[in-house]
Image (spheres, rainbow, N blue to C red):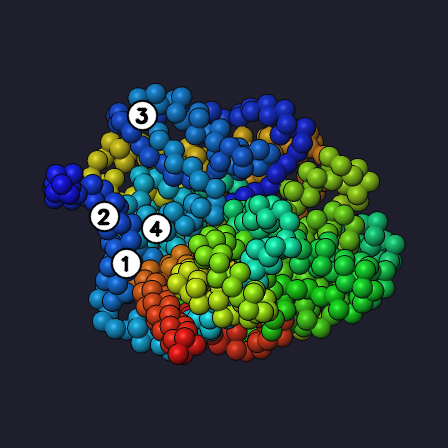
Amino acid sequence: MLDSIRPKKSTIYLYLLIPVALFIFTVFFPLVSALVYSFFEWKSGPNKIFNGIANYKQLFADQVFWASFGHNLYLVAACIIGQIGIAFILVLFANSRLAKCQTIHRTFGFFPSTISAVCIGMIWSMVYHNKYGILNWFIINVLGRPEWAKVWLNDTKNIMLYVSIPLIWQYIGYYMVIMFSAIAGIDKSIFESAEIDGATGFQTAVHITLPLIRNTLLVCLTLCIAGNMKAFDNIYTMTAGGPGYSSMVMAMYGYKVSFEQSNLGYGSTISVAIFVLSLAVIGGSQWLVKRATRRMEV
Amino acid sequence: MKKVISLVLVLALFAMSAVAFAATPVAATDLAYKGELVLMHFSTSEESEGNGGSDGFRTTIAAWKEAHPDITLTENVLANAEYKTQVATLAAADNLPDVFLLQGMNTIAWANQNLVMDMTDIIKASPYYDAYNQAYFTPFTTPEGKIYGLPVLTGGTCTIVIYDKAMWAEKGYETFPATWAEVEEAAEKFSAEGIDTIAFGNGGQWQLNSDFVSTLGNRYTGPEWFASLIANTGAKFTDEAFVKCLTETQRLFKDTKIFNADFNAVTNEDAREYFISGDAAAFIGGNWDWSYIWQTLKDGNEEKYNNMGIAVLPQPADAELYPNSQNIGLGYAMAINPKLAEDPDKLAAAIDLCYELTGPAFSSYVAENYALGGLTSAGDVDLSAFDQQTQDFYNWSYVDTDTCEIYDSYLDSSIWSVLNTEMQEMLNGDKDPATVAADTQAAYDAVYNS
């Protein structure tokens, strides 16, 4: 019976052909091209000179690149805590029996993630603006502490925190929606049993909800890390990586090297490095999470 | 330099009426070529609104098309920022269009890779050669003397001080101070009232180079130093005179009350609004900023418009050269893809297009409609039809000041990327001028001495 409705292999391959071809053309081919180009000196024109692993040697000695990688890790950490963490808490609140208008929470929570990153960057540039921004206005006129007001986006030491906040704000709703759907899939009787057994909200969250949506959290974690390892547009709009290199991230540095410095060979090397480092960070974090949750289960 | 091409906006009445009269028509040269010719440029219709160079360019293109109906001129038009990325990508793929706009800083690198045609003989054979301003060719000339493009659009300054005469007169200055020491004194008075003395925006990182250091550097080093850097004949970014320029720049921004506190976080577009709104008594920017301020004040604040003054950058106490200098030039040139040599008729058409877009048809149009100058002299410009501000700006730009080079019209872009980024840190005090100079020299050596 199954064989009679199962399409022929050739039909399956035909259906797969278009997406696979698109994938190869848009993802695989550029990735392999970047890998090939990373072994060439390729500056300001078509001439490419094979230079072996010279670009990789330069990469290992490039302090700006590694500082940028550090900034990406900062973003990842800030966004895991800020985006997934806050989203989880908000989902628990919104899912509680006391919460009203759950649909409105979902809609408005998700809304910022539909706005283009450039618009978000511009909006927050205005929020942070030294003279006309709402943040300094609030500090000066509401809190009455003018000494706290400053040029936020020129604060080298804390600039990564300031550029992380818009990113966190933008994507909380995105992870909320994913978690809403995961929690909706949990059998309600489990929560009712826990309530009857006298479990507190915190205990329910940690010992029931978290383990049961572990796989969804892993997906969120992967999305969060992948997204922040290639962060570009918000920060480019707000600071363009400045002051100096203090908010530079890897993708922006790759762009700067490739197009501002017309060094496409080294830019390709940076792209390969972003790919490898992202895989390593995602793989490492998944391994850590699985290990930690396994311990909890034991 | 980033915007040397986005030249002077202008004369509301004349621009708005757009009575496009060009005294000199496009020459109807008899061309054998019949077919498509591709031109890539960044004079979008939006940019040409009130922008003399851009408007003149588009008008001359239209006239050339009309004069040559058998040639299909296909225009690939992008905004300036996108144009730079796109043309660099096409160069990397060896897929440049037939005719395009070459940026000065790319000349040597692209010439070395045979991406642009050597136009030395073509330029000498031009029917307009005698009327060319030869100084404009420098960014497109290699150390061997080969020229790779016909400078296009209009020449505009990259460093101009725009100030409110009434605000400065109130503080006891009838004209804008000639020295930074005087500006520092004025800054005490302005800051006491919560007013920024000079507004500046370096959020894009290129502004400090194009609109400040390029001129201030000339006051310390003189033109020979930069000429030596271009020719790679011994000058270094680490030379004492240039480091002194960086040191003074850092001092002015970091240790005085002259500039707005957020100079590193806002762009020139933001900073000029500080001046327009009266939050700052002066502004430093390029000709494109003058145009914007001129237009905005003319439309909305007649009193401030009448008080609008212009000046050169003040002179530092320890600088001894060229106190009346400003950096001016043409940042782009019409260039031809060398592959056109395979088709002599098509090449002849491309050359004719380049001649006309930089020739008397263009120059007379921008001179008569906008009081601007291009590569080809348009003769004596009758300024009487223009308002006083425009007349002053014309004389200041082309007659009354000494000129110097725009740094980033020359040398490889990777060098400026390092200098611009690190100068931003330097202004915050996170990096010292000597280190910035050393890192820039390292980038220079990586390109020219490795």
Q: Residues within 10 Å of mark 1 (few under 14, many from 20)?
A: some
Q: Nearer the viewer, mark 1 or mark 2?
A: 2
Spatial distance from mark 4 to mark 3, Cα to Cα? 27 Å
Instruction: Tell me the chain of label 4.
Output: B
Residue B420's x, y, as percent? 52, 64
Spatial distance from mark 3 to mark 1, Cα to Cα? 41 Å
Q: Nearer the viewer, mark 4 or mark 3?
A: 4
Q: Which residue is mark 2?
A: A20
Q: Nearer the viewer, mark 4 or mark 1?
A: 1
Label 1's element?
Answer: helix
Instruction: Tell me the chain of label 3.
Output: B
Do the CB atoms of the residues marked 4 and 1 lie less than 8 Å apart?
Answer: no
Residue A31, label in figure: 1
Residue A105's x, y, as percent? 60, 49
Residue B272, label in figure: none
Q: Which residue is mark 3?
A: B71
Classify residue B222 by image quadrant: bottom right
Do the CB atoms of the residues marked 4 and 2 lie less than 8 Å apart?
Answer: no
Q: Hey, what amino acid is under mark 1?
A: Leu
Q: Which residue is mark 4?
A: B89
In the image, taking residue A105 as reference, residue A269 lies left or right, namely: left
Q: Residue at x 29, y 33 (%)?
A: B348
- Near-viewer residue (B267 or B385): B267
Q: Earlier in the sequence, mark 1 or mark 2?
A: 2
Q: Residue at x 66, y 58 (%)?
A: A128
Answer yes or no: are tags 4 and 2 on the same subunit. Answer: no
Q: Hey, what amino acid is under mark 3?
A: Ile
Do the CB atoms of the residues marked 1 and 2 lie less than 8 Å apart?
Answer: no
Spatial distance from mark 4 to mark 2, Cα to Cα? 27 Å
Label 2's element?
Answer: helix
